[in-house]
Image: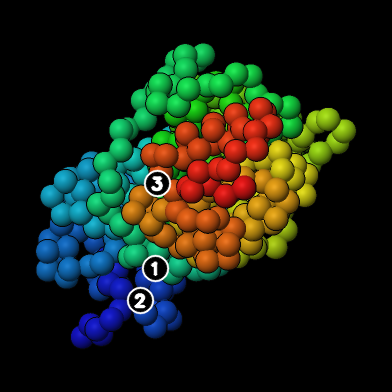
């Protein structure tokens, strides 16, 4: 008998072993309940109609119908929060990251290789809670389109000249963040200041995510490596399971990629990135905190604001999950929420003011 108030989960995977591992990982969670499992999308379809789950976990490679095809059909006819749980093979990772565009709210790695059962148990329950809270019907925004380099992106944001020396843009996100980041970056010009991105994402998937962004955006995007130089026209994505920090040596910015304890249960952590940007770049930076569950990034964004940086938090209406931005606003790290569609203009506007040395007050959507 199902208990009221619990989040109901349906596990869809062709491997009986994986179904068992996922079920056992959630067994001790008082607010979660695995109401059923399915070995393929056809069985899953029937169980969705009979069991009314709140959240699905979905494999990609399955018999009779692959997970991506099923996801597209599900989002068209019976939208539900979906967490993709995929193997770490590069082609599968690429499909999993692309599937976030089709409506999945999160992606996790299957246990095995560098991703252990213990790590899955630490993160799966939190991801399911975030998925259950996710806003599936968000304001319609134009889809990013692949842009041949060096063609400039969508003309909504005009470039205001060459990048200012020392300027750094730091972006952090979690649930729903892959699509929010893609939307923002695809609207920035090729001459944008150096960009650092901390997105909560597993190992290997971060490289697929960076490669997808590189295909969509006028700026170059790559998974960060230790000691990479931060420069205009380049966006660096923190590798999954590693923290990324900004370092300054003379007139040069670079990144340090390191392991270490999880911060706010995350690695990479947005707080770690933002705190390092506050220390290294001070007022020569812009911090952007996007959709995600929890509080990661809020303290770091506050440090950036206290160091003189411009700070932006995404507003509730455009977030998949209004957790991290809300915490930042409550702390005073950002004055208020900014709609996602306005963030590219805010980023480029703050850059223009910083270069010109204007004393004009910033717009209400931005905090200096």
Label 3 SS: loop
On the image, which quarter does residue 15 sit in?
Answer: bottom left
Secondary structure of the residue carrying tag 1 is helix
Residue denoted by label 2: 32
Can residue 131 be spotted in the picture?
yes
Tell me if residue 97 can be seen.
no
Select label 2 or label 1 by which is in front. 1
Q: Looking at the image, which is closer to me, 227 or 113?
A: 227
What is the distance, in whole Å, between disc 2 and disc 1 at their CAs? Answer: 8 Å
Report the mark closest to the observer, 3 or 1.
3
Measuring 43% from the left and 81% from the top, which residue is drawn there? 28
241 to the left or right of 150:
right
Q: What residue appears at the point 21 percent right and 48 percent down from the top-left corner? A: 75
Q: Residues within 10 Å of mark 2 (few under 14, many from 20)?
A: some
Tell which of 217 and 201 is nearer to you. 217
Question: For the residues marked 3 and 1, what is the alpha-carbon distance in whole angstroms?
Answer: 24 Å
Report x, y in % for residue 124: 45, 65
């Amino acid at each position: 008998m199902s208990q009221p108030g619990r989040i109901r989960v349906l596990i869809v995977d062709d491997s009986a072993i994986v179904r068992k591992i996922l079920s056992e990982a959630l067994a001790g969670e008082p607010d979660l309940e695995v109401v059923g499992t399915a070995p393929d999308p056809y069985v899953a379809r029937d169980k969705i109609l009979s069991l009314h789950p709140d959240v699905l976990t979905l494999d990609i490679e399955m018999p009779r119908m692959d997970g991506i095809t099923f996801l597209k059909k599900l989002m068209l006819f019976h939208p539900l929060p979906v967490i993709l749980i995929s193997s770490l093979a590069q082609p599968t990772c690429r499909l999993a990251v692309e599937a976030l565009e089709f409506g999945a709210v999160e992606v996790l790695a299957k246990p095995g290789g560098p991703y252990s059962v213990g790590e899955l148990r630490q993160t799966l329950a939190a991801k399911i809670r975030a998925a259950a809270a996710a806003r599936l019907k968000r304001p319609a925004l134009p889809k990013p389109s692949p842009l041949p380099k060096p063609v400039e992106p969508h003309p909504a944001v005009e470039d205001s000249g060459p990048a200012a020396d020392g300027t750094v843009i730091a972006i952090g996100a979690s649930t729903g963040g892959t699509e929010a980041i893609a939307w923002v970056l695809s609207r920035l010009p090729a001459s944008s200041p150096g960009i650092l991105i901390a997105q909560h994402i597993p190992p290997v998937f971060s490289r697929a995510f960076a490669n997808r962004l590189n295909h969509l955006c006028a700026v170059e995007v790559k998974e960060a490596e230790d000691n990479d130089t931060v420069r205009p026209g380049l966006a660096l994505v923190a590798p999954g399971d590693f923290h990324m920090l900004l370092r300054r040596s003379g007139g040069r910015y670079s990144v340090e990629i390191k392991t270490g304890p999880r911060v706010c249960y995350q690695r990479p952590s947005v707080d770690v990135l933002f705190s390092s940007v506050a220390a290294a770049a001070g007022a020569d930076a812009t911090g952007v905190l996007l959709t995600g569950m929890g509080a990661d990034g809020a303290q770091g964004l506050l440090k950036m604001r206290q160091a003189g940086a411009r700070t932006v938090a995404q507003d509730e209406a455009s977030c998949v999950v209004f957790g991290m931005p809300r915490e930042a606003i409550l702390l005073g790290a950002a004055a208020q929420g900014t709609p996602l569609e306005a963030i590219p203009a805010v980023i480029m506007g703050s850059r223009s003011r910083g270069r010109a040395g204007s004393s004009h007050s910033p717009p209400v959507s931005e905090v200096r």
